[in-house]
Image (spheres, rainbow, N blue to C red):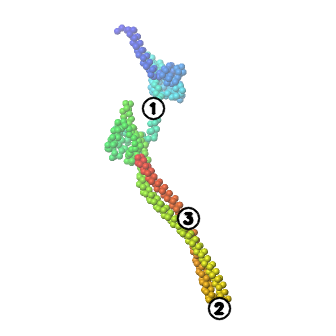
Amino acid sequence: MAFDPIARLRALLGRSAGVRGKMDALNRTQAVIEFALDGTILDANDNFLAALGYERAEIVGRHHRMFVAPEEAAAPEYAAFWQRLAAGEPDVGLYRRLGADGREVWIQASYNPVLDRAGRPLRVVKFATDVTEQRLRSADMEGRLAAIDKAQAVISFSLDGIILDANDNFLATMGYARDEVVGQHHRMFVDGADRTSAAYLAFWEKLGRGEYDAGLYRRVDRRGREVWIQGSYNPILDMAGRPFKVVKYATDVTAQTRATRTLHASLAELADTVPAIAAQARATNALANEASRSAADGGAMVEAVISTMSAIQDGARDIAEIVSMIDSIAFQTNILALNAAIEAARSGSHGKGFAVVAQEVRVLSQRSAESAREIRALIEGTLDRVREGSERSGEAGVAMRDILTSVGTLLERVSDVAQATNQQAGGIDTVRRAVAELA
């Protein structure tokens, strides 16, 4: 076949147009920059300039190291990087670069040596995509996962419950080495009676459907000891939204759970005794009321005794005054009898009968005076005893009033205790129910 230069030119122009179309498409979607083989910047498109925050005139003619941290640019690896590109070897990866304002820019890029017809490198073209936001999100997620891995027990399973991996916290909690659990089924951590239960089978069916499960779980460690964990089983979805594994995040709460259950038992016991205490408090309150009434009655009786003793004392004083009057009359009668005897003696024989009468009157007055003195002595003794009794009654009255005050205070306190006990009974019952929910 004869050589057709026109056809050859058309073919070359067609390929050139195809290349230009592809380059235009790359320029529209990616950041593109060209370098000499030594790293000097030859050109950059608008996407690259926008990503790094430069104007074209600020970078053309400068070296690529302007986008690199100083410590990285001075490292031997950076020099080797450009040596490989100059030798025609491409480089692809995730790179950290610095923008015009010093901020970090992460790019997913490829450095591509462009060859001449003889296969010799002419320049380097970099195609890049700014993945800074994705990188930050990824770093944030990785940081969170690392924090969770440090703080919690983490284990992953296939959808049918086969153990894929476990972190050190989980292994320490359950007492296993990693090679003892990987490849085994989750049921190795479950008590024998629960392994074949319908609830356990439904649990894994639920996870297999992509539904998560969270709560307080009772598990068994390598030695068969009870372990309580607060955790969540989280189905992990693939790009199509289908679950492909389950990751469990857990915290060992064995000590807290045991303490809560002990507290619950103690509260239940206390709740059982509080009604009896409340009944005793009510009975004590009733007794205190009765004692208050008895003390009030006793106080009234003491007041009556005091009043009676005062009346007796007043009567004794009146009697003493009457006796004094009798004594005075007897004294005056005795004087009159003496005067009558003197007059009878003066009258001679005519006064003998009168003298006898006067003598009898004098004797009677003397006896009256003597009786009056005896009565006075008795009354004075009685008055002394009445005064003493009155004083004692007064003291008893003061003491009884103090007793009444004390009984009143006691009654108030007992009433407060009874009321507080009833309130405590209700409060303890509320706390007991709350702790029961935690347990």
Q: Secondary structure at mark 2?
A: helix
Given residues 282 and 371, the one toward you in this image is: 371
Residue type at the position of mark 1: Ser
Q: Position of residue 57 (x, y in %)?
A: 54, 19
Q: Is residue 141 above or below residue 299?
A: above
Residue located farthest toward the bottom when viewing the structure as drawn: 349
Q: Quadrant of the N terminus?
A: top left
Give the Cα separation between the discs numbered 2 and 3. 73 Å
Residue 103 in view, yes or no: yes
Residue at position x 44%, y 59% from top? 283
Q: Is residue 334 above or below residue 230?
A: below
Q: Position of residue 97 (x, y in %)?
A: 50, 27
Residue type at the position of mark 2: Ser
* Nearest to N terminus: mark 1 or mark 2: 1
Residue located farthest toward the front when viewing the structure as drawn: 350
Q: Which mark is residue 398?
A: 3
Residue type at the position of mark 3: Val
Q: Secondary structure at mark 1?
A: helix
Residue under pointer 2 = 349
